[in-house]
Every structure is written in structure tokens, then in C-alpha cells.
Amino acid sequence: MAQVEGIGTTWNLPNYAGELFTADPTQTPLLSMIGGLTGGRQTDNFEFPTAVLYDFPDAAQPEISESASATAPAASHIAREQEKNVVQIHQEVIDLTYAKQSNSGRMSGINTAGQQANPADEKSWQIQQKLIKIARDVEYSFIQGTYQISTGADVANKTRGMLELCTSDSGTSIAAASAALTKDMLDQLFREMADNGAYFGNMVLFCGAYQKQLITKLYAEQFNAQMQTTQNVGGMNITQIETDFFKMGVVWDRLMPNDSILIADVAHIAPVFQAVPGKGVLFQEDLAKTGASDKIQIYGQIGLAHGPAFLHGAITGLATA
């Protein structure tokens, strides 16, 4: 069904009787696990820090003689570097005529005595769907978003997503080059994450349907051993497997690219909201009235605090068939 652009009327938004369904994904597992649209952190600057990184010199055995110790060595210090991300604007508008809202009893399609239009309240239903759309867009951005910082009023801020973070120069990722996912490939990623300093706090693997079934086959023996195979994170029931370095949940996320998997330490991820003074972080308000319709906008500024790249990992370019 095409989206109706512009004002909603009795004629382009007809009422029907019957249960409402959509085949589009409405669950947002990553967003749900890290606080949803009502939790997380706040900022009063569209740029916000995600981590302050520092490195030690390579570990080495000192070789300092007694004579040499009589003279202090040259001073040295540990340097730090800040990493950052941005919030992006989410804005949705509905505009329903008074006539549309008045004609709740006028129905199209099959009509049988005693049936009622579904939804009963067009305005409330449209607002609810816009909030779901925003949650879907946030989930997509947090996974697949590409970073862009505003340099002027006509340039949009775009928050960096987890896959771009993992495939950056400081991230941990494997380019599969269209190869099928294997346990050796996963073991290599886990090993590289460990070598790169991952904390392994609360690890969750996000994947699409094809990779989810493949992972189940790869770890079938572990599941059949009747280990603890489910856990609850942020209200999401997910399968759990145990690796050499950590226990990890596996969750199907329909907004993950089919050819990629993401392993995220959700203990160090949070949504970030920038409030509008006097209004809040995600709010609805009436827009200026120019005639016989209710025009309402929903507005929010949301970004991802993803922590340092070394906490997470990804495999991209996997076979999907």
C-alpha cells in the first residue's frame, strides 16, 4: 500500500472493518536492549563524546643497570584522544481533516451489519504508527547509519551506526568476500576482538534470518547439550551460546543487512537524546492551523553512544544463499 502524502481526507484514508496487519518489521531489538525511546542519555550539544581513548606502550622487559638508574630517564606521558558521534533529527507530521475524523462510521470494502471501523480513532492510530516508524528508523540508523556532521543549517547530522564503527580503521571486522559463515570465521573474529582489547561485558550477536539459521546449525551440538540457551535482555528473549572468551546472545534483527553479523557489547551502548527546552526529547505538538484540519508533528533528536570500536565486532559480505 502506498503512503498517502499531504493531508489525510475521507477519500484517501478510507475506513475498513477487520484486523490490522503489517508485514514490515516493528520490533527493534537493539534499541529495546539499550533503553528504547524513553531511556538513555541526554546532551545539550549535537556532538557528544563516545569514548576517550589512550594506549600504553607495548609491554617489554626493562633493562636498567644500577649505574643507569642513578640518572633518571627522559619523561614520557600517556596521551588521550576523544571520539564522538552526533544526534540526528527525526520529524514526522500528520494532517487530518475535520471531515475525515467526523466520518468514522463511513466504511469502504466489505461491510456486514454490526462491524466497526478499525482503527476507531484515526488520529491516535496515525500518531502511534509514526512513533513506530521513528523507532524503526532509529534501529536502522544505529545499525547501518553512516556518519555525517553538520557544517551548516542546510547539512544534516547523521549518527554513526555500529557496522560503520566496526569496519572503521580502529574497529574489528572481517570481510567475508561472499563466503559462507563458518565457525572458523566466528572464532577468528572472537580472537581478534580479544587481541584488540574487547571487554566482553554483555555480548549480543545481531543477524538476519539466513545467518540466524546458519549459526544455529554451527552451534547445534552446544544447543543439544542442553546448556542454558535463552536469556532476557531488555525484554528480548534471545538464544545464548558460549565461546572461548564470553557468553553471547544471538538475536534475529530484521533490520540487519542479510550479508552481515554484528557482535555488540550492549553494556557500553546507549541512545542519546537532545532535548528541546520546554518540550522534551521526543514530543508531539500541534502545528499552526490554516483551516479545518489537525496538523501534528512528532519531533526528536537522537544519536548513538556506541563506545570505542574495539568493544565490538562484525563480519560483512557474507553469502546469503
Image (cartoon, grey):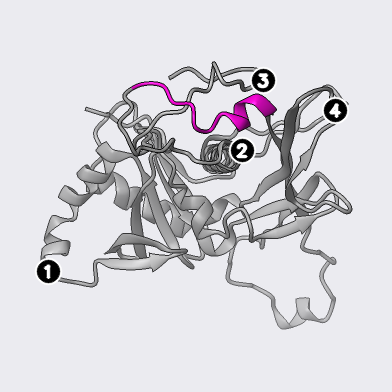
* First in sequence: mark 3 vs mark 4: 3
- The residue tagged 4 is 151
How far, Cα to Cα, is label 2 from label 4? 37 Å
Q: Residues within 10 Å of mark 1 (few under 14, many from 20)?
A: few
Residue at the spot 54% in from the left edge and 17% down from the top edge: 12
* First in sequence: mark 1 vs mark 3: 3
Tell me: residue 83, above or below residue 211. below
* Labels 2, 4: front one: 2
Tell me: residue 51, above or below residue 209. below
- The residue tagged 1 is 225
Q: Is residue 246 visible?
A: no
Which three-letter amino acid code belongs to the residue tagged 4? Answer: Thr
Q: What segment is highlighted magenta in the picture?
A: 98-109
**Quadrant where the N terminus is found in the figure:** top left
Kindly identify which numbered label has been placed on residue 7.
Answer: 3
Mark 1–mark 3 CB contact (< 8 Å): no
| Residue 287 screen position, x and y as percent | 81, 33
How far, Cα to Cα, is label 2 from label 3? 12 Å
Q: Quadrant of residue 291?
A: top right
- The residue tagged 2 is 123
* First in sequence: mark 2 vs mark 3: 3
